[in-house]
Image (spheres, rainbow, N blue to C red):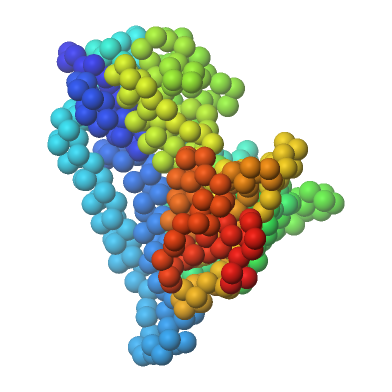
Amino acid sequence: MAEFDVIVIGGGPGGYVCAIRCAQLGLKTACVEGRGALGGTCLNVGCIPSKALLNATHHLHEVHENFEKMGLTGAKVKVDWAKMQSYKQDVIDGNTKGIEFLFKKNKVTYLQGWGSIPAAGQVKVGDEVHSAKAIVIATGSEPASLPGIEIDEDTVVTSTGALSLPKIPKSMVVIGAGVIGLEMGSVYARLGTEVTVVEYLDAITPGMDGEVAKNFQKILTKQGLKFVLGAAVQGVEKGKGKNTVTYKLRKDESEAAIEAEVVLVATGRKPYTAGLGLEAIGVEMLPRGQVKTDAHWATSVKGIYAIGDAIVGPMLAHKAEDEGMAVAEVIAGKHGHVNYDVIPGVIYTTPEVASVGKTEEVLKQEGRAYKVGKFSFMGNGRAKAVFQSEGFVKLIVDAGTDRILGCHIIGPSAGELIHEICVAMEFGASAQDVALTCHAHPTFSEAVREAALACGDGAIHA
Ligand code: FAD
């Protein structure tokens, strides 16, 4: 039996970041991971492999759409799917090995195997029981399906199967128009797959600013994705070489069906805590399967904490990481803090979509007076030069104080641009603070400044 100050269960972005920070704070730390590689969902079957495929297919899209316009002509680019898959795997391996290196560098003990908690203060991995003053549950999440749909990860797949299909399918139905469904749908649409997205709600990307969502749908439609909205999927019938997805339109209860070679079920994810033995030791759970925690990530059992996808909040890698760092501070007797009002969300399609803070819809519900400053990338020279002038920056500020309440961007590098506003919001900045800050020309960032100007006397290039 080894004795530790902290044992973190789960080596995803929440768990590995927590373990490193604990070690940096002088705590003797171990991290347990069962999947055979560090990095969790994010590095192995989530953020990183999906971005590798998005990157490769984005370049393919550029070749087809824009190369000729720039005077680049010549031999046709062909897709070598096996090679693209091995590029993706190299990216994964490079990242997961990097975390093993960071563990060694920071003296975090990597315990390989599935962990359980036989009693408070104990973690069992294989036949060994280790003791720890504090335990952090960072076991993440797994894909959620719909009743009546049997996933085989062959032709009816979750995002995990979709990242590693044996060949590029001719047709695909994506069930769920959320971030994961649209990113993977984009990948395959760019590779020539006929992609139809079926969504229960009447709009794509639920929770996102309505104007951005509408624009985003229009752009994706132009890129070849088809959408069936307001449709409740009834089931998937597997056939030889094709699957049939049946759905009922919510507006008139009429039934219809679509056939596709592959069905991607992208209806969200659920917390994963199986096998930990939480019930036996009395850790309280929430009705939707998350571990219940207080404001300092403590569970109902003393000395046991939980973070990341396994608890409430947006299922995002950076949210898990922030909680990992914050709970490490708490365990070390310091102050740990996560500002849940300023957690950006990004969709890595082309164009990218990014948002932080409140949407107009939420502010209306709250009855709060606000002003909107908007700037189209049509007025941004850099965006025009790279054929990415679709989209806009929308900044939302308090009508009385000009303080920034939210920002929603659809356009080039939106996922990078959003951080200027995250920092501004952390500092309680006003739109005028951003508007008075010199922005280099020609950059996409100028569109953020112009949106800030539009909250006041007006943008220059609008
Ligand atoms: P996880 O990353 O799920 O890690 C938990 C780890 O714990 C797993 O490795 C698991 O094997 C291990 N584990 C579980 N139980 C045990 C046990 N008993 N013993 C030992 N080990 C255990 N988020 C973003 O922010 N940006 C993105 O672009 C993005 N893209 C995504 C794309 C896809 C296709 C998917 C599926 C997800 C994406 N996400 C993205 C979400 C992101 O991956 C998760 O929010 C993030 O990984 C959660 O981190 P975590 O540490 O809480 O859990």
Left or right: residue 100 compared with residue 211: left
Left or right: residue 45 compared with residue 263: left
Residue shown at 15% from the left, 35% from the top:
104
Out of 77 and 294, give the one closest to the viewer.
294
Residue shown at 33% from the left, 65% from the top:
84
- The answer to whether 299 is drawn above or below residue 273 in the figure is above
Which image quarter is the N terminus in? top left
Residue 255 visible in the picture: yes
Residue 345 visible in the picture: no
Q: Position of residue 374 (x, y in %)?
A: 63, 60
Left or right: residue 122 compared with residue 232: left
Out of 199 and 376, give the one closest to the viewer.
376
- The answer to whether 105 is drawn above or below residue 238 in the figure is above
Q: Position of residue 102 (x, y in %)?
A: 20, 39
**Total numbered labels:** 0
Residue shown at 60% from the left, 53% from the top:
395
Which image quarter is the C terminus in? bottom right
Q: Position of residue 176 (x, y in %)?
A: 61, 50
Residue shown at 59% from the left, 60% from the top:
453
Q: Position of residue 200 (x, y in %)?
A: 69, 48
